[in-house]
Image (cartoon, coloured by chain):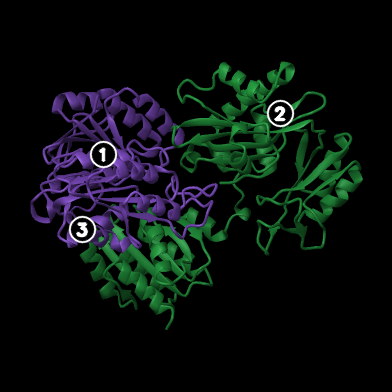
Chain colours: A purple, B green
């Protein structure tokens, strides 16, 4: 199975005609992703790369094509609205790639989503990849911006707040021959749709996932919560890395969520909590794959 | 982004949050004039972002960045010794900060000090109001030693602040009668300010009551959501670049995310998580990172060139580590940026480059063909080890 998305998942792209949206939709199509529709208000009736129909609204696109998953490549000022449009249309899964959405907008989005059946991944995330079994892992489902060729169909589930650190973990597990079941970037913002814990639960229930790499960073307490749950409930080996051991307190390290404030959310406290839960912690980011391999 | 005390006061005035009467002055004459318009005792405060002003000292020998006086003439004299001078506090470092403005305000008699803040709570995805009867002191200590004295009220993001919530907080703080009414108005105004300005934090410490039953915000700290600054031009205009690290100001002009640190190995990385991890691994191999620098996902050649100029502007830098794992980023763009930068600046320190990701072969080819003197690395460990080694030679 893998989690969240499969090679036959029908995907819709909101913002398919924008610069990034178009580039990465093209790369996803080449990877084999079933992109069945694009949405750009005012461009309904056009066709993307002479194969993907474009619609004005998500509702219309969903009814016409049966898409169940939406990816958001809409600029930050309009992204909150775009997510809500997909929630309203009844999408199963919404993957928000957009970086820089105001916190107040995300707060309203999360509130509006209560009681809906949609799951949101992101925002400010690299997306989701379930590798396929073709050359360079093609034939899978790639939603977002991750380079496809670094993946390999396999058994490691990867979950991370950071995009480029996800790529590191993926590349390392590919070189070790382990490969990945699904890789999920949950995003670096303080308010996001899906937590480390949510994804751990999905991996734990997925028969194709045999082990897990969880990548966290300073700030907040999401990694600690995931570790506490894993200690009691997770029956698969987990390796982890926490970025930001050298970050000075009080300075926001790029991601809006990555800040040590009031002495909380430090890398050492997080690593301690993870170890306490029986998770193998990699000392450096280049040892994520080998740390996992050592406990298998 | 931080703002000055006088700017916080102006925001309070704009949103009808009561605070002591007063104004900002850029000259000693204006400071004296403001003091004359106020009556009784007035307070004069040097305007810099750093804390510890009261106990700070000026490099010209004048002591203290905060003074009280009943004489307008004396306020003028004090102002003349502050304005244009460098104030050193425990937060500014030895170099201190130039005081360009002073605030002159009515000194108030205080009956009791309280704490009041609104912040964005990431766990509940909602604004939370934090209040305490223990004001004027370090609130984190209060929270640790006497957690029962901290009042927390989570506000529903869509319903907004309700009258019953105001009554609840007011009652828990022990307010009654006219004071409760005044506090209610203040809190309502403060919540409006918080939302309207896309604040991440607004903290009043202390909030005070006076013998004549006023409720006033005496000192305030603001935090703003950087993601929302595009729709807050008035807030963005409050930025004072002279208070920020000049390298960080230069970096933000080019859309780069740079934070200066104390080490000597400069890093240029794409992605915040990988940038943090790169700093960590330099330290792991015995080196010290000189900066955090995330060039972002969609960097151009020009941005990469400017990033190089900024990191080379730090005299402590003895070596550079470029670590790119291209997702959105095309490795060839980075490679061309590096080559462009090396042509413009005379690079005399070791440069270690690790490239992986989208279009990596073209990127490596560009670097190989350029004739730029660099050390190529295979992976992140290799890159960090080579960088630490290179600066020892």
Residue B282 drawn at (x, y percent): 40, 68
Give me the disc on residue B18.
Answer: 2
Label 2: which secondary element: loop
Label 3: which secondary element: helix
The one nearer the camera, A133 or B124, is B124
The one nearer the camera, B381 or A75, is B381
Is disc 1 in the same subunit as disc 3?
Answer: yes
The one nearer the camera, B202 or B248, is B202
Q: Which residue is mark 3?
A: A173
Could you tell whether B41 is left or right of B188 in the image? right
Residue at the far left: name it.
A134
Q: Quadrant of residue B210?
A: top right
Q: Quadrant of residue B189?
A: top right
Mark 1 / mark 3, whichever is N-terminal: 3
- Residue B296 in view, yes or no: no
Q: Residue at x 50, y 35 (%)?
A: B120
Residue B346 higher or lower than B215, as above or below = below
Contact, mark 3 vs mark 2 (Cβ under 8 Å): no
Q: Quadrant of residue B287?
A: bottom left
User: How far is disc 3 from disc 2 in space, using C-alphas?
Assistant: 59 Å
Dot 1 alpha-carbon crowd within 10 angstroms: few under 14, some 14 to 19, many 20 or more? some
- Residue B106 in view, yes or no: yes
The one nearer the camera, A169 or B101, is A169
Residue B272 drawn at (x, y percent): 39, 54
Is disc 3 in the same subunit as disc 2?
Answer: no
Q: Which residue is mark 1?
A: A201
């Amino acid at each position: 199975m893998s989690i969240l998305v499969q090679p036959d998942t029908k995907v819709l792209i909101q913002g398919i005609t924008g610069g990034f949206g178009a580039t990465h939709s093209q790369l996803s199509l080449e990877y084999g992703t079933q992109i069945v529709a694009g949405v750009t208000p005012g461009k309904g009736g056009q066709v993307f790369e002479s194969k993907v129909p474009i619609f004005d609204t998500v509702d219309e696109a969903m009814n016409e094509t049966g898409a169940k998953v939406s990816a958001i490549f809409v600029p930050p000022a309009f992204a909150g609205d775009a997510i809500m449009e997909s929630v309203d249309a009844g999408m199963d899964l919404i993957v928000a790639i957009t970086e820089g959405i105001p916190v107040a907008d995300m707060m309203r989005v999360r509130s509006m989503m209560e009681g809906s059946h949609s799951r949101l991944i992101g925002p400010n995330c690299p997306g989701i990849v379930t590798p396929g079994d073709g050359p360079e892992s093609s034939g899978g489902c790639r939603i977002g911006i991750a380079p496809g060729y670094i993946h390999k169909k396999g058994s490691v589930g990867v979950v991370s707040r950071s995009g480029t650190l996800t790529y590191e973990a993926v590349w390392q597990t590919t070189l070790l021959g382990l490969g990945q079941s699904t890789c999920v970037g949950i995003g670096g913002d303080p308010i996001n749709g899906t937590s480390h814990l949510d994804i751990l639960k999905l991996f734990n229930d997925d028969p194709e996932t045999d082990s897990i790499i969880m990548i966290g960073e300073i700030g907040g307490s999401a990694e600690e919560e995931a570790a506490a749950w894993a200690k009691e409930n997770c029956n698969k080996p987990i390796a982890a890395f926490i970025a930001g051991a050298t970050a000075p307190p009080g300075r926001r390290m790029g991601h809006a969520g990555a800040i040590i404030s009031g002495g909380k959310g430090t890398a050492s406290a997080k690593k301690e909590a993870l170890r306490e839960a029986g998770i193998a912690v990699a000392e450096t980011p280049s040892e994520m794959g080998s740390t996992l391999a050592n406990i298998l | 982004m931080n703002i000055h005390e006088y700017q916080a006061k102006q925001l309070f005035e704009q949103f009808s949050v009561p605070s002591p009467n007063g104004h900002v002055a850029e000259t000693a004459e204006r400071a004296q004039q403001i003091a004359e318009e106020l009556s009784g005792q007035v307070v004069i405060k040097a305007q810099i972002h750093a804390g510890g002003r009261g106990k700070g000292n000026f490099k010209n020998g004048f002591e203290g960045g905060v003074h009280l006086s009943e004489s307008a003439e004396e306020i003028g004299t004090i102002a003349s010794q502050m304005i244009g001078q460098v104030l050193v506090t425990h937060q500014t470092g030895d170099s201190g900060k130039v005081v360009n403005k002073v605030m002159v305000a009515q000194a108030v008699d205080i009956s009791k000090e309280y704490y009041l803040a609104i912040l964005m709570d990431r766990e509940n995805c909602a604004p939370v109001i934090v209040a305490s009867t223990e004001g004027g002191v370090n609130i984190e200590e209060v929270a640790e030693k006497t957690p029962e004295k901290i009042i927390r009220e989570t506000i529903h993001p869509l319903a907004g602040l309700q009258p019953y919530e105001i009554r609840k907080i007011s009652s828990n703080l022990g307010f009654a009668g006219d004071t409760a009414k005044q506090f209610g108005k203040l809190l309502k105004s403060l919540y409006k300010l918080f939302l309207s300005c896309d604040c991440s934090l607004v903290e009043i410490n202390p909030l005070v009551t006076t013998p004549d039953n006023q409720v006033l915000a005496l000192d305030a700290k603001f935090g703003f959501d950087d993601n929302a600054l595009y729709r807050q031009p008035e807030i963005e205009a409050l930025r004072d670049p002279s208070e920020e690290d000049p390298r960080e100001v230069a970096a933000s002009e080019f859309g780069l995310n740079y934070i200066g640190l104390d080490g000597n190995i400069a890093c240029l990385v794409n992605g915040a998580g990988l940038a943090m991890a790169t700093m960590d691994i330099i330290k792991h191999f015995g080196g010290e990172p000189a900066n955090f620098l995330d060039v972002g996902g969609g960097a151009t050649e020009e941005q990469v060139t400017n990033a190089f100029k900024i990191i080379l502007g730090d005299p402590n830098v003895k070596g550079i580590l470029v670590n790119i794992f291209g997702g959105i980023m095309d490795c060839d763009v980075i490679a061309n940026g590096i080559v462009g930068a090396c042509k413009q600046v005379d690079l005399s320190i070791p440069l270690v480059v690790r490239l992986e990701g989208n279009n990596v072969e073209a990127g490596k080819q560009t670097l190989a063909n350029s004739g730029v003197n660099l050390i190529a690395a295979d992976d992140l460990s290799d890159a960090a080890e080579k960088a630490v080694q290179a600066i020892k030679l």
